[in-house]
Amino acid sequence: MRDLTVAVFRPDDDRLEDAIELVESLGATPVPDSMLAVEPTGASPREDADYAILTSKTGVELVAGSAESEERDRWDPGTATVCAIGPKTADALREQGYDPEIVPTEYTSSGLVADLEGRVDGARVEVARSDHGSPVLLEGIEAAGAYVHETVLYRLVRPDGSGDSTELAAAGDLDVACFTSSLTVTNWLEAADERGIRDAALEGLSNATVGVIGEPTRETAAAAGIDVDLVASEATFETLATETVELAAPTYYE
């Protein structure tokens, strides 16, 4: 039996390196094919909010002025209660000297909204994130009575030359695909279109095991004609990759 080939679409930084290492630890062959690149906007979050929400490690590094791609003055949250949408973001905040006081049990926008409901009526809430943030977060906090301001810290774009995994799928040689957002799905399909192999890539993907993070990503994939086999039980790449590889070949990585 040949090794499972597992396509991972993380940004081309330590997240992609970690994904490769994880897939290898599962005994499979990673197919790194980054579908996201970061373009900082140079914007900084407001410093007069009652609550400040960060949604990604990239955002944290940018506001802290520690990102390699851009240097800026360090953001000061003042007296704001700092919130992180998940443990990775919380860890990044701590590494940069911030104190995340609220991390939802469910690592999603809706999970954070649920944790903030009842706390933010009349409060000023700053949301600092990418240009592809879920509207669920803003709408939910506004519905809870807060005054919400969004700062777009960076744009997410598809890297030049991405799409090698679409070639593998079209050839029937891709066993697993792990989509971490709706944008990775959209960009993967655009890459296949660019190479003129969309139909063949979709057909190949129908014979692979497809895992996604979250219901919004599943809905995007389904709308594009991609059959999703698994929605990760926890919104982390580690859980997504492990559960999808296990589904593709039970006990394969044990």
Image: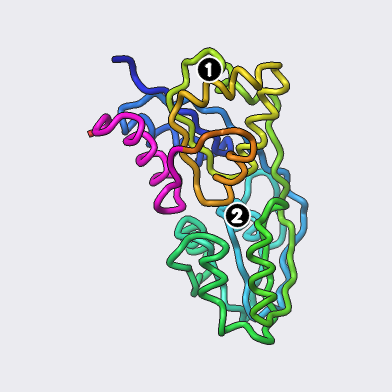
Task: Name the amino acid type tagged 2.
Answer: Glu
Quadrant occupied by the C terminus: top left
Give the number of marks: 2
Residue tagged by mark 2? 61
Identify which residue is drawn at 39% across, 52% down: 233
- Residue 12 location, quadrant: top right
Q: Magenta stretch containing residue 240, yes or no?
A: yes
- Mark 1 or mark 2: name the one nearer the start of the chain: 2
Tag 2, which secondary structure? helix
Q: Magenta stretch containing residue 193, yes or no?
A: no
Task: Name the amino acid type tagged 1.
Answer: Leu
**Residues under labels 1 and 2: Cα distance?**
34 Å
Residue extent of the magenta highlight: 229-253
Q: Nearer the viewer, mark 1 or mark 2?
A: 1
Identify which residue is drawn at 61% across, 37% down: 185
Residue count near mark 2 (Cα–Cα under 10 Å), binned few <14, some 14–19, many ≥20: many
Between residue 101 and residue 3, name the one nearer to us: 3
Identify which residue is drawn at 45% across, 59% down: 87
- Residue 9 location, quadrant: top right
**Residue sitting at the far top:** 171
Residue tagged by mark 1? 168
Between residue 67 and residue 170, name the one nearer to us: 170
